[in-house]
Amino acid sequence: MPPLDLLTVGEAFQDLIFVGLPHMPKHGEELKTARFVSTVGGGALITATAAARLGVRTAVVSALSD
């Protein structure tokens, strides 16, 4: 493995983003949207991704469940 410039450590999440909702749903209310985005989340992943896009050699240490 080549040497790293940046090692981030932290939790990784899957962000689920509902785009274009007319308002925040009330408890128990269902809303429909034409657009939905699933992407990586968590400070460690977001930082490593941004740095890698700038050409920095990065790696992430995060726990994974079974």
Image (cartoon, rainbow, N blue to C red):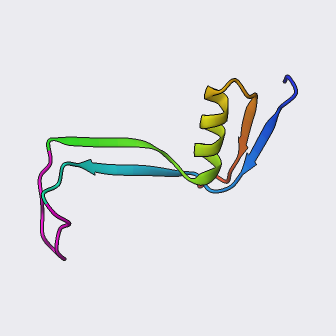
The image quadrant that residue 56 belongs to is top right
The stretch of residues the image draws in magenta is 23-33
Estimate the x, y position of residue 34 in percent, counting from the top left. 14, 41
**Identity of the residue drawn at 15% across and 74% down:** 28
Estimate the x, y position of residue 41 in percent, counting from the top left. 51, 49
Chief secondary structure of the magenta portion: loop
The image quadrant that residue 23 belongs to is bottom left
The mark tally for this picture is 0
Q: Is residue 5 above or below residue 66?
A: above
In front here: 51 or 45? 51
**Identity of the residue drawn at 46% across and 49% down:** 14
1 in magenta:
no
The image quadrant that residue 49 belongs to is top right
Q: Is residue 11 above or below residue 3?
A: below
**Identity of the residue drawn at 36% across and 50% down:** 16
Left or right of 13, for residue 63: right
Estimate the x, y position of residue 59 in percent, counting from the top left. 73, 37
The answer, for residue 57, to whether it is visible in the render is: yes
Left or right of 2, for residue 39: left
